[in-house]
Amino acid sequence: MIYLIGAGPGDPGLITVKAANILAHTPIAIYAGSLVNPDILDYLPKEAEIYNSATMTLEEVIAVFQRAHEKGLDVARIHTGDPSIYGAIQEQIDWLDEHEIPYTIIPGVSSFLAAAAALKQEFTLPGVSQTVILTRMEGRTAVPELESLERLAQHQSTMVIFLSVQMMEDVVSRLLKGYSPATPVAVVYKASWPEELILRGTLETITEQVKDAQITKTALIIVGDVLESEYELSKLYAADYSHAYRQAKP
Ligand code: SAH
């Protein structure tokens, strides 16, 4: 069996119990060395064969799957956060389907969720924003024109921007096409790692702050009025609101 595993955002305690239990019995592992915390490898048996995919091509990763499958051995393919977000797992899934090699996907805690926890922040505040956009600036990977930051900014929703902090100036100038300059922004570097760092500012100040802190990778940019605004209390816990599990108090 090939296990495609989300290892969580960094803190080894943020892997799922299910994934940790699987790792404990997996003889072969391939991990995304540029982002996965190497401490995660401590969950593997001592004698496990470990590959770092940072230096491998898709063909080389697949060759490991193939050889293990032929020998009847399990493989843990360890991705950072959750593999469905910028995880490049679809090409592995499609290859496994095509070759009828059984696999299971174990979800993980994505870094955008660890960033919310670090910020002690709900991303969906009533009356402010009920939508979270997860996106990125184009880099070597293109982004469809309809999803450009300036277009998405028109919604003024909560937005979490991956893979883009090294282009902060450009990010901000595009966001300003939709959000006002006073809109709060946070940059969370290495959420859940010991070296985690949080910058809070506005669209006017954040570029300078990121430059001063010398953050150029492994960070999320979070934009939106949820970070600093008056909001309505949730209906879910409001005394005058009934729902399936609770009657309104008179
Ligand atoms: N699948 C991952 C994302 C992989 S793309 C997930 O679900 O989180 C890599 C990008 O994710 C980085 O460039 C950075 O923008 C973000 N990232 C990953 N781990 C992070 C962390 N611990 N703190 C902040 N950003 C992180």
Image: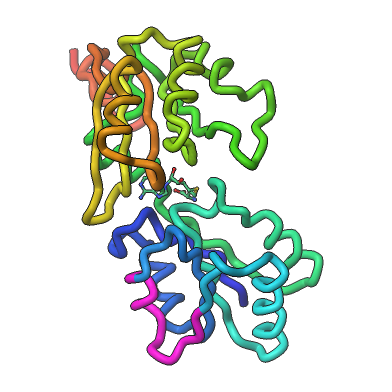
Percent position of residue 213, x then y: 26, 38
In which image quadrant can residue 202 be found?
A: top left
Report the residue at 40% width, 80% height from top.
44
In which image quadrant can residue 193 be found?
A: bottom left
Report the residue at 49% width, 41% height from top.
163
Q: Nearer the viewer, residue 66 or 36?
A: 36
Whether residue 160 can be seen here: yes
Relative to 53, say whether 165 is above or below.
Answer: above
Whether residue 242 can be seen here: no
Residue 219 lies left or right of residue 162; in this view the side is left
Report the residue at 43% width, 32% height from top.
160
Which quadrant of the figure contains the N terminus?
A: bottom right
The extreme right residue here reads 98
Relative to 167, say whether 233 is above or below.
Answer: above
Looking at the image, how many numbered discs can be counted on the residues?
A: 0
Residue 36 lies left or right of residue 153; in this view the side is left
Over which residues does the magenta segment extend?
A: 39-50
Residue 117 lies left or right of residue 101; in this view the side is left
Percent position of residue 94, x then y: 74, 59
Residue 152 belongs to magenta span: no
Percent position of residue 241, x then y: 28, 17
Which quadrant of the figure contains the C terminus?
A: top left
Q: How is the image coloured?
A: rainbow
Q: Nearer the viewer, residue 11 or 98?
A: 11
Report the residue at 55% width, 32% height from top.
137
Percent position of residue 97, x then y: 76, 64
Q: Nearer the viewer, residue 19 or 134?
A: 134
